[in-house]
Image (tube, grey):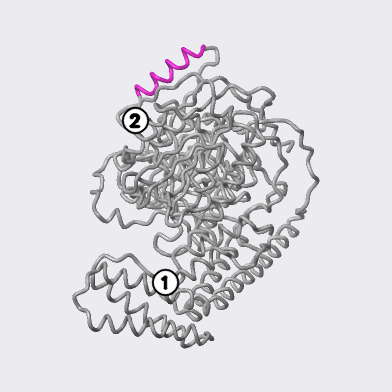
Amino acid sequence: MIQAGWSKCWSKRENRPYYFNRFTNQSLWEMPVLGQHDVISDPLGLNAAPVDPSLDNGQRKRCLSEETAVGGANSFKRPKVDIMPVTPMVPISPSTPGPPGTPLSKIWGSPTDEKQQPPSAAPAPAPYRPTAVYWDLDIPTNAVIKERPPSDALPPHPDVELQRAQLTTKLRKHYLELCQQREGIEPPRDSFNRWLLERKVLDKGKDPFLPSECEPVISPAMFREVMNDIPIRLSRIKYREEARRLLFKYAESAKRMIESRNATPDSRKVVKWNVEDTISWLRKDHSASKEDYMDRLEHLRKQCGPHVAAVAKDSVEGICSKIYHISCDYARRIRDCHSTLLKECNISETGEAPEVQDRLVYCYPLRLATPSPPQPRVDLHFENDVACVRFKGDMVKINRNYFSKLELLYRYSCIDDPRFEKFLSRVWCLIKRYQAMFGGGVHEGTGLQGALPVPVFEALHKHFGVSFECFASPLNSYFKQFCSAFPDCDGYFGSRGPFLSFSPVSGSFEANPPFCEELMDAMVSHFEDLLERSSEPLSFIVFVPEWRDPPTPALTRMESSRFKRHQLTVPAFEHEYRSGSQHTCKREEMYYKAVHGTAVLFLQNSAGFAKWEPTAERVQELQAAYRVSGRTLTSPGPAPATGTGDKELETEREQGTSQETPLTGDTTPPPGVTPAPDPASI
């Protein structure tokens, strides 16, 4: 019973003993009976009765089906899924995490003498059962890579991560103050987050989050976004009076800026004449329509915009340079703190370089070369459907079913913590890192983590063999194999590292990148390099916004690429994304309409085209999957009404999902591929 997670506790309120299972959070007054396996409250089979090894596979399946049938009224009926036979792909080595049914003797390293809280009024509360699942961690990978050494990133630690989060908050505040004081504007929405993404494309520094070694120093992304909001931010206009006020405000701001800056006489003359002409027209013509005001505004921007940009250029460049140099200073401080902590634990930052064989293997989670130091105490408690993880008074929250997902990913991927003694501290570091990336504003940064709907990924996997996400995170991934931004804290949960550092030889991949132009452009370069070098089947299905005014360089390059096999467009407002804050948001906030079209491009080499050709039937199935609203897929409860407000939601989203059993042909190892290396030897 102890191995199954049960412990005997004392209820102070009821003044009698009860039994608590730390794996399933189930409380019972009576002694539990082992052997009753609930696949929802106990997905790993920790409380299941052992199956007689003498039985053959058919007898074992019958035993399991009978056990599920007699699970009682509290058992949860799962939807039926037809599973196709799968050829065994990689034999599991002793040091590789086993299948989900493998029991562990201890979870999270919780002290055995720590008593749980007594149960509530109900004598036998039902165990937690997730209402909806947006992932399928049973799908194996078909991505093949060359064996690679461990990463030199330093292992995460809550003390270091807390300092990084605090310094990132200070850096955001500096950016806000510089924009307000120097230009009189608020920072453009999500511009700081896109600056982080654009800088990390170029960054050669050692901090996994803050840029510290980039060339050029001035970020083109930040410079472009700040300049677009000068002299004022132009927003969407719905009504005539709004258009009139915006035109007047732009004219006044342009005149004020040109008079207060070091402008040339010609610039002053042009701006002053156009502003006075506009104000005179506003005072005379009170019957103009909204379109008249917008046309006049566009004319004023064309006449005054270049002169305003010229006088603001040096100031905006100063903002970009100042933020970068502060980031470099913060990164050095974090590195020094991390190095000091490792030295106190007698851990060397640079260990011996392991020997790596020149062979092909199926992709495996990223490993760190530096051993992890001892972790401090991190507390966990649950508030209804929310898991609360606390370190030194700083609490992060995550929906309970996503907490269970992280537990499963950790079990599959982590090899240095079989007793889960460091699990909670690593979960805290992971969530804290993504909080720092998102920012503290309402819905800020969540567009960088948006995901494709589940039906779309079901179609991708079923018809195109997709089993890998190029841009995801442990929080929003659907497969257990994916690339993500942070190798240090994501690797324990299945990440293969940043995609621009990931070089697959074969496989079928989905790419839904963060909508940052510089990152998307680097992604296309990486795609073409991989497709050019590989003769094995290699396929990338790419989802990017269809921005045409002006078109993005990444979209233009993919449309003219010799590897493009097919392209389709999903119209605006006719498809959905899953929220980037899906791990914390409410069910009714999970999906939102896309306000722009999405271009879907198939980039494949010759072998990939022969294996996963985008035929008319397959493409039609993919388009049909987009027509299935994700809001109708969530479990019980009234679905929210869809109104016109959906069209006002912004979509700058990422990542994807899938739910389908793998095709039999995709699991057969290609010639020359060896099983995944023993992680202990890497």
Q: Which mark is residue 39?
A: none
Count the labels in the image: 2
* Residue 670 lies in the magenta stretch: no
Q: Is residue 196 left or right of residue 349?
A: left
Q: Nearer the viewer, residue 324 or 317?
A: 317
Q: In this view of the protein, which residue sits in the foreground, 12 or 457? A: 457
Q: Dot 1: within a 10 Å radius of its alpha carbon, few (fewer than 14), some, or many (20 or more) residues?
A: few
Q: Nearer the viewer, residue 549 or 614?
A: 549
Q: Quadrant of residue 507?
A: top right
The answer to whether mark 2 and mark 1 are in CB contact below 8 A is no
Which residue does the image show at 22% across and 70% down from the upper left? 289
Q: Is residue 254 above or below residue 576?
A: below
Three-letter amino acid code at disc 1? Lys
Instruction: Name the residue located 72 percent from the left edge and 60 percent from the top edge.
Output: 339
* Residue interval drawn in magenta: 56-70
**Mark 2 is on which residue type?**
Ser
The chief SS type of the magenta part is helix
Mark 1 secondary-structure assignment = helix
Q: Disc 1 marks which residue? A: 302
Residue located at (69% from left, 57% from top):
204
Q: Residue at x 32, y 40 (%)?
A: 634
Q: Percent from the top left, x then y, of residue 522? A: 59, 50
Q: Give the alpha-carbon distance from disc 2 to disc 1, as whole Å.
A: 67 Å
Q: Secondary structure at mark 2?
A: loop
Write down the residue under mark 2: 75
Please tell me in which quadrant of the rendered image residue 92 appears. Answer: top right
Residue 66 magenta: yes
